[in-house]
Image (cartoon, grey):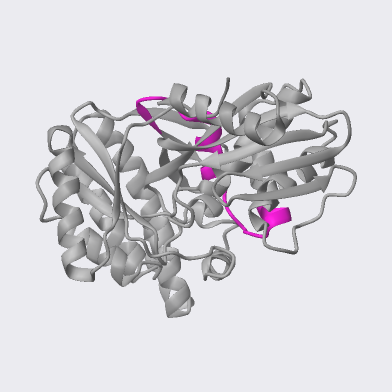
Amino acid sequence: MNEAVIEHMRGAFERHFGAAPSYIVRAPGRVNLIGEHTDYNQGFVMPLAINRAAWMAARQRNDREVLLRSENFDRDARFSLDGVEKDEGEDTWSDYVRGVAYILQDVGCSLRGMDAVVWGDVPIGAGLSSSAALEVASIQAFATLANLRIKALDVALFAQRAEVEFVGVNCGIMDQMISALGVAGHALAIDCRTLDYQAVPLPDELTVVIADTMKRRGLVDSKYNERRRECEKGARLLGASSLRDVTPEMLEARQNALPDRVMRRCRHVITENVRVLACAEALTGKNFAAAGELLRQSHVSLRDDYEVSSPELDLMVDLAFGQPGIIGARMTGAGFGGCTVNLVSAGCAQKFAHSLTEKYAEKTGVKPSLYISTATAGAQVF
């Protein structure tokens, strides 16, 4: 797979810029098995890097200009490293590259101009972190061309800053960490407070199937930032610096001190942290029934307490539990649309995907996109 994409990227670069690229960079998207809306609350998450990625073919320029070609949008964009500003036109996709350049220079990195072709097969707006993948790929491209050595964890931190401070999405660290640090064959259990992480084996008996409802949403325009503010309010009212410090027992004792909506937001985050740790233990011990039940509980909590699901996501999850080989299912990503993640018995993955596609299309008139994915490695430079 990588070899075919590398050839595609090399050919696209040569067609557009008339010469071969110096490097080709890959940074994967991700699916989060469990631990939703916990990362910006300093909690626990457990994503894995998927076999869909953002790619950049790049070479150094002799000036301070950055010329970008998007194969996905059939668009060109250009900016100067001497005055990085957001795109005010139709090429907002370039803001993720611009934001990375802005942050890298803000932390003292000396960058060089770049010609680059950008392409990716992470569905945009599906909750699989196409933006984080592009940010991480962009950092690796800038760093490689400028001979900079940036630790993988710092790549994630700089990419997060680009999305928060430049693009304007108040995201947590999970998406960028798994894109930079993914381990093939494993999920990563990440402590979003300390940034400690542990590779959790994804047993050979299980396969991950991602089901895209085809319902799209924009994070900046959604209620994502509103949920974050509600969590911060709940932590203040509970006398905690973060919901990470609140146990289910503490919340139960103080729940009457919170407005109902804020209490339910807090209850999701606090119980979700417990579920992440329990799921990591269940997968390590190959207790698949327990892992599947934790995914189901997570979806119910996201639907009822955090209110970030949608009719399409709820339907996809409900249908999944009637399909062959299902272990567990839930919505994944920020919500309001996008994808579900399904843990399926490995031998049933193709049958499961085919049946779920048919059932969803029958109910909605919309054909979903389903992806059977392995857990892949994080960002790479070729």
Q: Quadrant of the N terminus?
A: top left
| Percent of width and height locating residue 150 | 70, 26
Residue 288 is left or right of residue 145, and the answer is: left
User: As displayed, is residue 285 above or below residue 341?
Assistant: above
Q: Residue at x 67, y 24 (%)?
A: 21
Q: Residue at x 19, y 41 (%)?
A: 344
Residue 382 is left or right of residue 212, and the answer is: right
**Does residue 193 appear in this view?**
no
Q: Nearer the viewer, residue 114 or 126?
A: 114
| Percent of width and height locating residue 380 | 55, 24
Q: Nearer the viewer, residue 8 or 242?
A: 8
**Number of numbered tags placed on the structure image:** 0
Q: Residue at x 36, y 49 (%)?
A: 274
| Percent of width and height locating residue 256 | 42, 77
Q: Nearer the viewer, residue 353 or 273?
A: 353
Q: Nearer the viewer, residue 243 or 315?
A: 315
**Does residue 354 appear in this view?**
yes
Q: Quadrant of residue 109?
A: top right
Residue 379 is left or right of residue 374, and the answer is: right
User: As displayed, is residue 86 above or below residue 312?
Assistant: above
Magenta run includes residue 210: no
User: As displayed, is residue 30 above or below residue 231?
Assistant: above
Q: Which residues are magenta?
A: 163-187
Q: Residue at x 40, y 25 (%)?
A: 184
Q: Quadrant of residue 51?
A: top left
Magenta run includes residue 175: yes
Q: Quadrant of the C terminus?
A: top right
| Percent of width and height locating residue 225 | 58, 66
Residue 288 is left or right of residue 229, and the answer is: left
